[in-house]
Image (cartoon, helix red, strand yellow):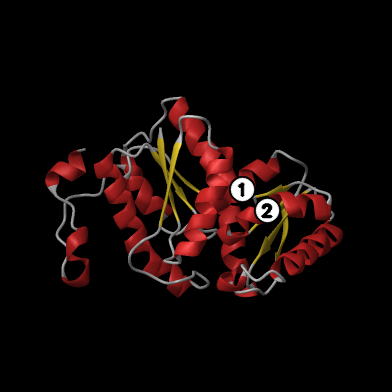
Amino acid sequence: MRIRVINPNTTAAMTALIGDSARLVAAPGTVIEAVNPAMGPVSIESHYDEALAVPGLLAEIARGEAEGVDGYVIACFGDPGLDAARELARGPVIGIAEAAMQYASHLGRKFSVVTTLGRTAGRAWELAERYGMERFCADVHACEIPVLELEDPKARETIADACRDAVAADGSDAVVLGCAGMADLCEFLTEEVGVPVVDGVAAATLTVQSLVTMKLRKSGRGEFAAPLPKKYVGLLADFGIEEREAQA
């Protein structure tokens, strides 16, 4: 089984961290391919960043389809391009916010989300509503650390403090980490905070692995059927869909 874990930003160091986190939970025989697009933002911290990350993400999905990849993880907490990726892919495509919230909902009555910047909190709430997780999500808290500063050794203590404060304020039973760049902190934070801390990279990897093991693929009908054949122009000329691709 081949699972392609896509970091939608272009920062290679974060891609390596994400790949390592996915491999920790992968079963023997599951090959994890951690990749990032060749074009796009170095981090995703706004709607603008997210929109401009999607073409590169979709190029990675298209490449994976040509290479026979079985399933995909979108490793950004905004789950950018998820619907479009599901149109392109034959196998399962799972976003890390989607998976993390669902896993956390199994662990108690409610969870808190701890994310990077406060400006992204609205997107987290939007996704909680979309996934039917709004009743489980107590609140969304920001540690106000930019994505590219998560590697700073001081960041882990700031994130731990934010998790402790969230649990105390919300009375939550679990914490969801709101950024793929926090994936390597899960065990440390669980010990520090005293409640389960859920990393979406691991959760999404296991979800894809389970669906592929069960031989489940998207239905290919209706909204998530392959995109209609169409020509694109200008910078997006390479993204056009040919008839044979639409019928695959």
Q: Secondary structure at mark 1?
A: helix
- Residue 172: in sight, yes or no? no
- Residue 137: in sight, yes or no? yes
* Residue 217 locus on image (x, y percent): 38, 32
Rendered image: mark on residue 176:
2
Residue farthest toward the top in the current orientation of the protein:
214
Quadrant in the picture for residue 57: bottom left
Which part of the image, by quadrant, shows the C terminus?
A: top left
Residue under numbered circle 1: 100
Image point 36% across, 33% down: which residue?
Answer: 219
* Residue 54 locus on image (x, y percent): 37, 62
Q: In the rendered structure, which disc, 2 or 1, sits on the residue that comes first in sequence?
A: 1
The residue nearer to you, when weighing 97 against 42, is 42
For disc 1, the neighbor class at 10 Å (few under 14, some 14 to 19, many from 20) is many
For disc 2, the neighbor class at 10 Å (few under 14, some 14 to 19, many from 20) is many
Q: Is residue 185 above or below residue 119?
A: above
